[in-house]
């Protein structure tokens, strides 16, 4: 149930207003509020920009600035505290969405790192298999060359023995 209006709104009214603004504007989970209309006694509505989205915000500084402005308004008995409270709530909501987005991105990065580790493990296993094949092939070639060298040397020895025998038979 909503409280009565005026400068002394309850926090439930403020949070309901924030919820209604988001529902009316149709904001998605990843969208960031850019401005909040501030109530004033005049008929014109003034927009207060939270921060420039082209540069990443400094969230602690943003929160501190809004908090300091809110405390100043409370000290001055100014009625614009409702707009500043809405602004601060929106800043906190934005920070929550940024944290959720960061958590989502970090989970995505973790999944990609795990996939990369699997690819690297497969690459290492493939490299080890290739090295084993190369070693096996090299040792087989070495054995074949030693065998053929021994065969050539054996033939040379045999032919030299034959030559000596023939020479001895002539002499």
Image (cartoon, rainbow, N blue to C red):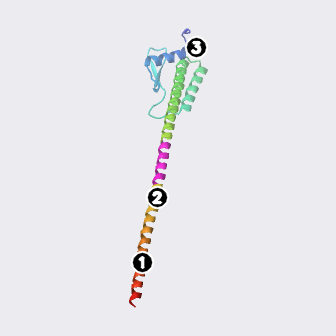
Does the magenta portion include 118?
yes
Q: Which residues are magenta?
A: 116-131
Main SS of residues in magenta: helix
What residue is shown with label 3?
10
What residue is shown with label 2?
136
* Residue 42: % across, % down: 46, 15
Residue 39 showing in the rendered view: no
Q: How much space separates mark 3 and mark 2, taking CA atoms?
A: 82 Å
Q: How much space separates mark 1 and mark 3, taking CA atoms?
A: 114 Å
Q: Quick one: label 1 or label 3, which is nearer the N terminus?
A: 3
The relative height of residue 124 versus residue 151 in the rendered view (above or below) is above
Q: Quick one: label 3 or label 2, which is nearer the N terminus?
A: 3
Q: Which residue is painted at 48% across and 40% down in the image?
A: 115
Q: How much space separates mark 1 and mark 2, taking CA atoms?
A: 32 Å
Of 7 and 120, nearer the camera is 120
Q: For the residue labelled by badge 2, is the local secondary structure a helix, a strand or a loop?
A: helix
Of 53 and 126, nearer the camera is 126
The relative height of residue 132 versus residue 65 in the rendered view (above or below) is below
Tell which tag, 3 or 2, sits nearer the viewer: 2
What residue is shown with label 1?
158
Question: Where does the C terminus fall, quadrant-wise?
Answer: bottom left
């Amino acid at each position: 149930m909503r409280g009565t209006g005026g400068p002394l709104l309850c926090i439930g009214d403020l949070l309901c207003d924030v919820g209604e603004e988001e529902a009316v504007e149709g904001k998605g989970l990843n969208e960031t509020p850019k401005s909040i209309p501030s109530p004033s006694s005049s008929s014109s509505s003034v927009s207060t920009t939270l921060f420039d989205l082209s540069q990443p915000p400094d969230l602690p500084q943003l929160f501190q600035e809004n908090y300091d402005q809110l405390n100043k308004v409370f000290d001055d008995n100014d009625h614009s505290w409702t707009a500043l409270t809405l602004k601060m709530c929106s800043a906190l909501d934005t920070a929550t969405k940024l944290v959720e987005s960061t958590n989502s991105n970090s989970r995505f990065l973790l999944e990609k790192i795990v996939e990369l580790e699997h690819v690297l493990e497969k690459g290492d296993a493939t490299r080890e298999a290739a090295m084993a094949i190369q070693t096996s092939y090299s040792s087989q070639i070495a054995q074949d060359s030693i065998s053929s060298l021994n065969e050539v040397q054996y033939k040379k020895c045999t032919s030299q023995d034959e030559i000596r025998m023939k020479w001895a038979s002539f002499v």
